[in-house]
Amino acid sequence: MNLEFLNIYNNIVKLTRNKKLYLNLGRSDEFSDRLIFLFLHFALFLKHYKSQMTKDRSQKLFDFFIRQIELSIREIGHGDVTVNKKMKEYVNFFYSILDQLETRNFEKKENLISFFQNLLNNDKNIEFYADYYVKFEKFLTKSTLNHFSKDIINPNF
């Protein structure tokens, strides 16, 4: 297992475990919500650092992430057929997030709010998520790719 990819994965998971993300949803914590935030963080990570990674390295990192998610689903107790079906749905969902991040203009706050309303299927505390997005992008700008791949980070944003 590639330690660099494992550190990146663990750092993205750590960002995803931010309790404020779930408290502001106003609903019970579910696997699907955790997956949405994991994909959102990972998509923003890839968007920001794509120029610093080769296509091959980006693909290997993506494959590593997907494999880790698949292992998590198997640990929950789902069988092969269910895992394969869910993974196809999850990968398509991830690509839709990535596509929106690449093509939409999020400098306009109303576009960012609309994105989060659709992503979270929620209207509650959407301003919080729009602000979080901006803060996370600034955090990525201040951090290096090496910062994510060497050790577990301590995000303060």
Image (cartoon, helix red, strand yellow):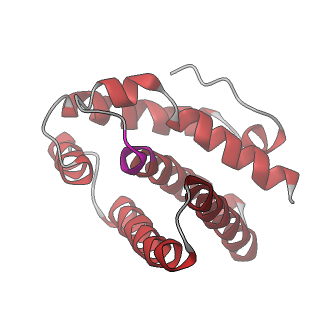
Q: Main secondary structure of the magenta part?
A: helix
The picture places residue 85, in percent across and down from the top left corner, at: 44, 78
Q: How many callouts does the rendering have?
A: 0
Residue 76, x across and y down, in percent: 55, 53
Residue at coordinates 36% horizontally, 35% vertically from top-left?
Answer: 29
Name which residue lies at 71% across and 47% down: 8
Q: Is residue 126 left or right of 83 when viewed as pictured?
A: left
Residue 119 image offset from top left, x and y in percent: 26, 52
Q: Is residue 36 left or right of residue 118?
A: right
Q: Quadrant of the N terminus?
A: bottom right
In terms of depth relative to the viewer, which is nearer, 144 or 19?
19
- Magenta stretch: give its range: 30-34
Q: Looking at this view, is 9 or 147 the one in front?
A: 9
Outermost residue on the top side: it is: 156
Q: Position of residue 45 (x, y in %)?
A: 56, 50
- Please state which of residues 75 and 100 is positioned toward the viewer in this rendering: 75
- Residue at 56%, 59% (x, y): give it: 77
* Residue at left offset 19%, top offset 42%: 113
| The quadrant where residue 33 appears | top left
Location of residue 94 by image quarter: bottom left
Q: Is residue 138 above or below residue 75?
A: above
Would you say 32 lies left or right of 61 here? left
Relative to 153, say whether 5 is above or below. Answer: below
| Location of residue 134 (image quadrant) | top left
Residue 109 covered by magenta stretch: no
